[in-house]
Amino acid sequence: ESRMVAEPRGIANQFLEAAVEPARWLDVLQHVAAETRSQHAQIVGVGPDFGVGFNWVNGMDASAHAAADRTELMLPSTNYRVAAGVSTAPHDVVWENSYAALRPRLTSDAYLDLCSDLDIPNGCQSNLVAGADGLIGFSLLRSAREGPTDAATRAMFAAFSAAARVAASLQVALEQDGCKLVAGSFDAMDVACFVLDQRMRVRALSRAAEDLLTTGALRLVEGRVSSPAPQIERRLVAATQAVCHQGVAAASVAVPPQARANEAGLVMLKLHRLPVRLWNMGFAPFAILTAKRRSVASERDLKLLRDDYGLTAAETEIAMLLRQGLSRAQIGDRRGIGAETLRSHLRALFGKLGVRRETEAIHLLHALLS
């Protein structure tokens, strides 16, 4: 009995070390599993949409994770452990009696089958962090041979949970501070920067980024950066999806100037994925979105196009309008010329730039000009 009480206090420091060096979490979970004579110990992050943010389990191989970490198996309607988690009060420990009450309410046997395949029907759990961003849960996963938890095991697990709760809260705070540190760096450069987590939600922002929200140039919708202009919003969503889900390292969206004089100039939104950080709880900086206002035409830009590429004054203006993201119709209206005259200018412009298509010209102009 003395070991059962003293041991949780003995590894409290190990939990705190894991919060600072998260790669140590598996070692701590292995220790918890061994001390409670359980097959696995687990820390899992479940988002408000029940997506799996992370799932750390000692002794579970990649194939088992592939089978378990599916969104359809993380819904309260299919997973009795998630159902127990979303209905559990902070600091409470729930165990097999709660699971037994929840199993008949499941709409599918898929998670029950998974528990049978992985031999994890028994165990207990507690919430470490719970809020609008979802929950971080801590669990013992026990085999049929190990049997249900007893009162002594649950008492030991409760002591472990107290230490794990402190460590998880510390790691979340450190990750959030990392977001503030990144935003502060961009403050020093007077650059508008939104720091995003792995769900592409804003975790911190620079003062210049706050100004963009204040003026309405950009806005936050459910925590994500959005544009009030539908066509820009579509491009921004596509760029976000590419960086978040398709492994694209960076993407950009040009926001053209509006007709009002006080909104002249081009805003370039650039989305950059940061180096992958393993063992984070979902609050660490995942990507940054910067916004930089550019003048319609700097003297350097105009000189480069005129002197190095031989563009006429009309072709130079059209090139700058292309770079700003204006459509052909908008360029024609701005210049007061018809579609055929504009096509003639564009053919000459493309020839001098050495490109064949409008998209190639736009990419080249972005690369060439400040």
Image: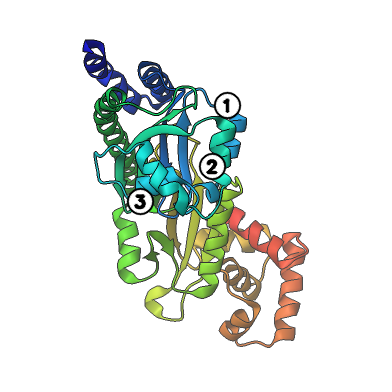
The amino acid pointed to by label 1 is Asp
Is 18 situated above or below 89?
A: above
Asked whether the viewer can see residue 71, the reply is yes
Residue bearing the label numbered 1 = 61
At 25% from the left and 39% from the top, the residue drawn is 92
Q: How far apart are labels 3 and 1 at the CA level?
A: 27 Å
At 26% from the left and 19% from the top, the residue drawn is 8
Q: Which mark is residue 112?
A: 2
SS class, disc 3: loop
SS class, disc 2: helix
Q: Nearer the viewer, residue 161 or 168?
A: 161
Q: Earlier in the sequence, mark 2 or mark 3?
A: 2
Q: Position of residue 332 (x, y in %)?
A: 63, 83
Q: Residues within 10 Å of mark 3 (few under 14, many from 20)?
A: some
At 39% from the left and 65% from the top, the residue drawn is 221
Is 261 situated above or below 336?
A: above
Q: How far apart are labels 2 and 3 at the CA level?
A: 27 Å
Q: Position of residue 182 (x, y in %)?
A: 35, 42
Is 270 situated above or below 96?
A: below
> In this rendering, would 86 be left or right of 295?
left
Residue bearing the label numbered 3 = 133
